[in-house]
Amino acid sequence: MSASHEALWSIGEFAERAGATVKSVRFYSDRGLLPEAFRSGGGHRRYGPEALERLRLIRSLRALDLSLPEVRRVLEDEDAAGRVL
């Protein structure tokens, strides 16, 4: 990961910045919707600004009642957004 260590947040800090819960961050991470988290020396997940933008997009799409498969399509193909919406 190219982000500097100053721009990396713990999962709790990351969730708070996104207005989400730690549980939802793990949920989206485990399903591959968020980019692979950097791991600290102790194995803790660390997230950067790119992941924050992505989580905010995921939350916005879910707020529009898109299903997880629809969210995945939008994330993988920008042109899919118009078709899905």
Image: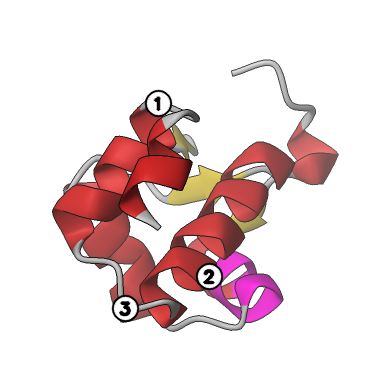
Three-letter code, disc 2: Ser
Residue 85 belongs to magenta span? no
Residue 50 coordinates in the image, percent (x, y): 66, 38
Whether residue 34 is visible, yes or no, is: no
> Would you identify the image quadrant in which residue 2 lies?
top right
| Figure label count | 3
Residue range (magenta): 13-18
CA separation in Å, label 3 and label 2: 9 Å
CA separation in Å, label 1 and label 3: 18 Å
Residue in front for this viewpoint, 42 or 78: 78
> Would you identify the image quadrant in which residue 51 lies?
top right
For mark 1, what is the residue? 77
Residue 71 coordinates in the image, percent (x, y): 31, 52
Is 57 situated above or below 75? below
Residue at 24% over, 52% down: 70
For mark 3, what is the residue? 65
For mark 2, what is the residue? 60
Q: Would residue 55 appear left or right of 14 to someone viewing this image?
A: left
Q: Earlier in the sequence, mark 3 or mark 2?
A: 2
- Please identify the quadrant where the C terminus is shown: bottom left
Q: Earlier in the sequence, mark 1 or mark 2?
A: 2
Residue 17 belongs to magenta span? yes
Q: Would residue 17 appear left or right of 65 to someone viewing this image?
A: right
Residue at 30% over, 78% down: 23
CB-based contact (under 8 Å), mark 1 and mark 2: no
Residue 39 coordinates in the image, percent (x, y): 44, 36
- Please identify the quadrant where the N terminus is shown: top right
Three-letter code, disc 1: Asp
Residue at 61% over, 83% down: 19
Residue at 41% over, 50% down: 44
